[in-house]
Image (cartoon, helix red, strand yellow):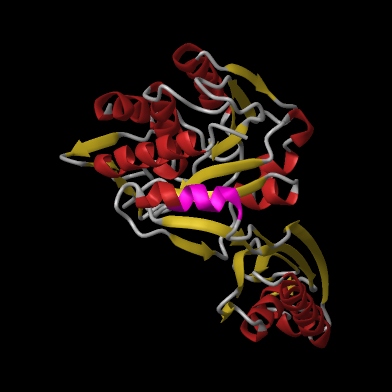
Amino acid sequence: MSERMVQVFRGLVKIDSESGEEERFLDHLKGLLEEALAAKCVRDSYGNLIARLPGRNSKRERPLLFACHGDTVKPGKGIEPIINGDVIRSKGETFLGADDKAGIAQFIEAVRTSDYRPPIEFIVTREEETGLVGVRHLDVSQLDAKEGFVLDMDALDAVVVGGPSHMLIDVKIHGRAAHAAMEPENGISAVLAASRAIVALPLGRIDPGTTANVGIIEGGQIRNGIPDRVLLKAECRGLEHNKCLDVSRRMEAVFVATAEAMGATAQVKSELAYRASAVPESARVVTWAKEAIRSIGLDPKVQTICGGTDASIYNEKGIQTVVLGIGVKAEHSTEEHIHISDMAKSVKIIHHIFKAAMEE
């Protein structure tokens, strides 16, 4: 089992699929699912992959959702997976891409090696890493599932039942250009206005369930010019929706007031990417997940996280969904790696869920 799964996984990570450039990977995966699993596959209008598998020795009629994402973060081109004993890692110049291609490989192997399963809708989305873009465009009217699992957490003992509200905050600061040496007093530095605002912002972990960050700042074109334009991309997240909105408003107010105090202006655009959601611990998907994790000798840890996953959108759209671990370690770094033995354990977890969900 492990050798075939590793071969599939290595093949998947070798196909470049940085966010927004998933086309070749998803075309390959479509063919693999059709050939290996006899799945019926379609691509929706945004390019997300939807695969349908009939049940096997199951009385259940409504399909169960399993989901992964097909994109990787950067640098993710030219990945060379290296196997050293039980560990798979990249050669070192890129991420490995186990987030989330290990989840895809594990799901494929679980289906291949099980004599039973409920009917399944398997979704592989685009552009998850850049803000759950693919799943936000997913037309759920094409789906029949009302319960499901996203395979996209690190620790195998995790059962993620909730996630945050997430505000995307884009800021444009307009100052006044001037020669930095000949007439600096006639300029209004948009970079300085942005810097003062950032210092005044509530950033980092504001409380256990709320975070804020400025991730991108772009401005200036020449060394000896007072820069008149700056673009910032910021965010805030909160497990409590209203608290997230409050932090977003505070951040907007700081940008506007700081710019105005210098004679500049700030245009702020805030967008709710997704709203905080939580699956009750009494839900069947939580019970099945906990029992499956116990079946491999681990103690399940039910948790909410401030990170975003596709499960947030599935829950928002009426599909009760939790997130399960795939065993990846040090994701989003060039030290990313995964143990083959942990991949095999994940397959066993999926098998147990198949068995638990055989009936309505």
Spot occupied by residue 353 in the image (x, y as percentages of width and height): 47, 39
Question: Can residue 294 be seen in the rendering of this structure?
Answer: yes
Quarter assignment of residue 126? top right
The answer to whether 271 is drawn above or below residue 177 in the figure is above
- 285 is within the stretch colored magenta: yes
Range of magenta residues? 283-290
Residue at coordinates 50% horizontally, 20% vertically from top-left?
A: 57
- 210 is within the stretch colored magenta: no
Q: Between residues 120 and 200, which one lies in front from this camera angle?
A: 120
The answer to whether 292 is drawn above or below residue 101 in the figure is below
In the image, taking residue 339 as reference, residue 293 lies left or right, namely right
Spot occupied by residue 272 in the image (x, y as percentages of width and height): 77, 60
Spot occupied by residue 268 in the image (x, y as percentages of width and height): 81, 68
In the image, taking residue 337 as reference, residue 140 lies left or right, namely right
Q: Between residues 179 and 287, which one lies in front from this camera angle?
A: 287
Q: Between residues 271 and 292, which one lies in front from this camera angle?
A: 292
Residue at coordinates 44% horizontally, 44% vertically from top-left?
A: 99
Identity of the residue furthest to the left in this view: 85
The majority secondary structure of the magenta stretch comes to helix
